[in-house]
Image: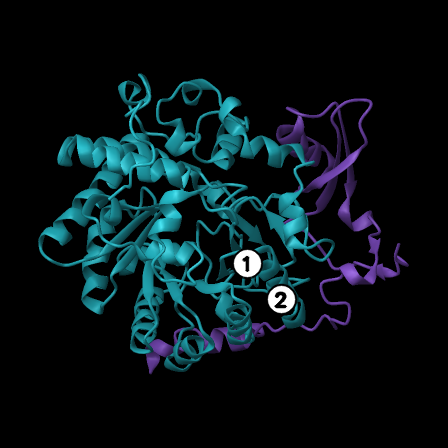
Chain colours: A cyan, B purple
Amino acid sequence: MISVSKLLTDLDAEGDGLRYDAAEESTKAQIRDEKQRRPVVVWNVTKQCNLYCDHCYAAADTDIADGELTTAEGKALLDDLADYGAPVILFSGGEPLVRQDLEELVAYADEVGVRPVLSTNGTLITEERAASLKAAGLKYAGISVDGLPERNDDFRGMEGAFDGAVQGIQNCLDAGLKTGLRYTITERNAPDLEGVVDLLTDVGVDRFCFYHLDYGGRGTEIVDADLTPVERREAVERVCDMTREYHDRGEEIETLLVGNYADAAYLVEYAREHMGEAQARRVYEYLRVNGGDPTGERVADVDYQGNVHLTQFWQGYSLGNVRDRPFGDIWEDESNPLLGALREREDRLTGKCADCRYSDVCRGGSRLRALTVEDDLFAPDPQCYLDDDEIRGPEPFAGGDATSPAD
Amino acid sequence: MGELDHEVDAPRGATSREWEVFCREASADPLTHVGSVSAPSADIAREQATRLFAHAAEALWLCPADETVRVQDESLALDPDSDGADATMDEQAMHDETLRGEAE
């Protein structure tokens, strides 16, 4: 997760508070001084969903699936996560609001000190549920919209899904709940990007997360509908331009890019071109400390049956199951050679990643996409859109003061 | 040690059959459980596991998760008294609730 607005406009990124231990709302010092040590945990509380989206990584369906963790098991999991020191729990699905105990689980997470946040399609968020989630202690709701109305509804398999999501957003904002957009960029919806931001800004949304498609679940089936490298670069440039334009007009929006750490390198190059060498150095240092692709380290996933995954998108492989062992024991068990290799991946990366000068801020990007497309765990991320002359050469700002603050 | 009288028999595998994977890094090493892969057949499970562990393994063993008996000390269970009842809406309720907020 890369906060474009923070890096390019110095806006204080709520994103940090959502990801890091937010016992104190100001987390600047933690971010700068050390990498996050415990993962944000995504918990797919159910596989069931009321929509059927083309790109769903969880391959969710309308049927109830066997083996969901019960309310009591869920609370025991939250106890485990609290003991381990997980800073944030992201309730996801399926559609998490189909679980009628969601508020109970949110309240319990808040009680044991794991910051509860939510990822939802928004169409089940009535005024009552927005209010009850807020009262339970929910800190943030990220609501998925993937294009202007017609395109979004087509993607999500339901007419009216766009209006339903916007109403859900409105209900959250009315309840006083911090609310943001989740937008997965593909070839089909890239043209709608600015239009959706303009429309939702008018509703009152001020946080926009743009996801690159990862190749898990049904996302694997639409790899062909993904952006080309040239289109991806243009889309990311538009996010950067749009962020600065809003800022220049005095409208503070927060924009984030998620799921492709070529973006980290691109942001350094963008800052250098548009804002000068000093800003580029600050951007680089910030991103270097944050540490590049988080798979198997700063993000973890527990599915509805308790299987632990390397990221929420990588559902086809599980490290173990929380019904067998506590989460922390599974996550710390580096006798698993895959876990060890991912955490020490720098020396294993091949092709253009092997000598990329931005490897410190990227770490090869998505290993899942490399595996899916190249059949090779350590091949370059097929979504990398950097030019050869950006990849080659000495490490940017080598010899600089690595501990200098980013702002 | 414990009595190993708690059996974990909850289903696993979100989209297809789940296969437990065991890996031996060198012939003198123990065979170690290294997680599981989802695959509809043993051949595909073997392919999946090989892609993930060939860089480290001299040998891989695979076993269908639904043929694996898992018993353990009760203290390890997430919730030994759990009755298996789930808290998810039934399908009709889910559809009734969808877009209700928008209709209000």
Q: Position of residue A357 (x, y in %)?
A: 35, 22
Q: Give amino acid for label 2.
A: Gly
> Circle 2 marks a residue in which chain?
A
Question: How many numbered tags mark residues here?
Answer: 2
State the SS at label 2: helix
Q: Mark 1 points at which residue?
A: A43
Q: Position of residue A349 (x, y in %)?
A: 49, 23
**Would you place residue A293 above or below residue A393 in this image?**
below
Give the residue drawn at x 61%, y 73%: B87
Quarter holding residue A148: bottom left
Give the residue drawn at x 74%, y 54%: A324
Per the rendering, the mark at residue A84 is: none
In the rendered image, the residue lying farthest to the top is A393
Visible residue check, residue A162 = yes
Q: How far apart are marks 2 and 1 (CA)?
A: 10 Å
Quarter holding residue A127: bottom left
Q: Given contact means CB atoms under 8 Å apart, are the residues at marks 2 and 1 in contact?
A: yes
Q: How crowded is mark 2: few (under 14 residues within 10 Å), some or many (20 or more)?
A: many
Residue toward you, A381 or A121: A381
Q: Name the residue under label 2.
A: A74
> Circle 1 marks a residue in which chain?
A
Residue toward you, A364 or A158: A364
Q: Give amino acid for label 1.
A: Trp
Give the residue drawn at x 24%, y 49%: A5
Q: In this view, does B70 lie to the left or right of A116?
A: right
Q: In this view, does A338 lie to the left or right of B43?
A: left
**Would you place residue A218 above or below residue B21 in this image?**
below
